[in-house]
Image (tube, helix red, strand yellow):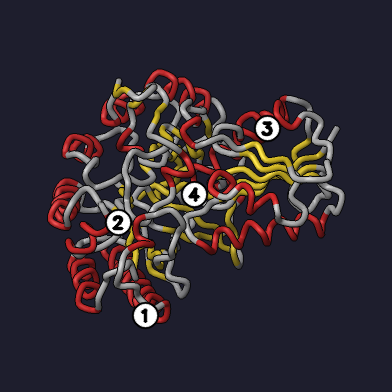
Amino acid sequence: MKKVAFYTLGCKLNFSETSTISRQFEEKGFLKVDFQENPDIFIINTCSVTENADKKCKKIVKEAKKISPNSYVAIIGCYAQLKPKEISDIKGVDAVLGAAEKFRLIELLGDFAKEQDAKVLSSEITEAKSFNNAYSINDRTRTFLKVQDGCNYGCAFCTIPLARGKSRSNTIESVLESAREIAGTDVKEVVLTGVNIGDFGIVEGKRNERFADLVFALDNVEGIDRFRISSIEPNLLTNEIITFASHSKRFVPHFHVPLQSGSNTILRRMGRRYLRELYEDRVSKIKTLMAQACIGVDVIVGFPGETDELFLETYNFLNELDISYLHVFTYSERANTRATEMDGIVPMKKRNERSKMLRILSEKKRRKFYEENLGKTYTVLFEEDVEDGKMHGFTENYIRVAAKYDPMLINETKQVTLDYINDSGNVEVLEPEFIYEKH
């Protein structure tokens, strides 16, 4: 029985796919082990959103060969699709599989016998036409359920369409079948993932269904306490979806909505499909219907052409918005994207300074959001996440809560009152008695 270990870089979508591929190996008789347990095979699922992600891949390969020098190392994921030859030249890599090949690892690599040269199995991205169902299980407290893949948008900074292909989706019925399977495993929370999940419904190039209808259908799946939407474009987050979430049985009041820039000038240069006025309208609609809702924001700093004045437009726009936290990305040049041909390159030092400013703003926003919710009662899903005798979990509106460790609380949803913000910036729960809920 060969031992196989998996390592995932990048997004929730990658985690869902790694988990599914690992189950394929187990079904074929392989023994899944941790990274440090001297595996015979390493499968590394890569990301390539930033240049730093590429460097991480090389580091993981190096560590794998330290742990198990004679192991077989296969690389899959976005970086593998974008730069297969570059990866095949990394010392220690035995195989590179692209987007159309990664779910056929066992079929294509057979007995995983090492050869003199790395094997490259990577088709053109136009061959990645089929949708491969995937969800994570037994890896974390919550499950990541893939409902959509690829993207038809052409943002000037993004390589994802080159790495994952055109937008394509599962069917509503198939997603419901997966959700019912997950419900039978004692999972309490499911996070819907994809590259552009609001574009759900395209099968073989034709739109057959809508994301809103998927949300309506999932709300009736018994056995799962919460559904969370991982990230959705502002132009695809409709009033219909927001209104439904405000009275949903299972969809939580948490929205992660990419902005990328608060300057209309930069949004146009980026090729985004909305302007800041629409984004402001989405935030207003959410907060009008769900005052307690958490709103997370993706933002890129240092995009070509972003002057000091245009950056301040973004900063001031975000400062005035009723949002809860930021995910800040420092722009990095990616090959084969339109942005690399643009003028107005921002020096890296200035990019880093702007990133720091927005990360400080994010902490202020998060603390204000937490303070507004103190004294209120929410349901927390506690995780196996223990630090200094305290366990942690998240409320439905994504407030990280700390409580005295109790093994009985792991993977349980409990009602608690939010007492105060501790030195770590998390909300502390003092009440020793929890209100036990049975679902």
Q: Nearer the viewer, mark 1 or mark 4?
A: 1
Disc 3 target residue = 105
Disc 1 target residue = 350
Q: Amino acid at mark 3?
A: Leu
Residue drawn at x 58%, y 39% is 98
Dot label at residue 11: 4
Q: Nearer the viewer, mark 4 or mark 2?
A: 4
Q: Amino acid at mark 2?
A: Lys
Label 2 and label 1: CA atoms lie apart by 41 Å
Q: Earlier in the sequence, mark 1 or mark 4?
A: 4
Label 3 and label 1: CA atoms lie apart by 43 Å
Asked whether the viewer can see residue 374, the reply is no
Q: Secondary structure at mark 4?
A: loop
Dot label at residue 213: none
Q: Earlier in the sequence, mark 4 or mark 2?
A: 4
- Characterize the local packing of mark 4: few (<14), some (14-19) or many (20 or more) Cα atoms within 10 angstroms: some
Q: Secondary structure at mark 2?
A: loop
436 relative position to 136: left or right: left
Disc 2 target residue = 376
- Characterize the local packing of mark 2: few (<14), some (14-19) or many (20 or more) Cα atoms within 10 angstroms: few
Q: Nearer the viewer, mark 3 or mark 4?
A: 3
- Characterize the local packing of mark 1: few (<14), some (14-19) or many (20 or more) Cα atoms within 10 angstroms: few
Label 3 and label 2: CA atoms lie apart by 49 Å
Please tell me whether residue 317 is drawn above or below residue 109 in the rendered image: below
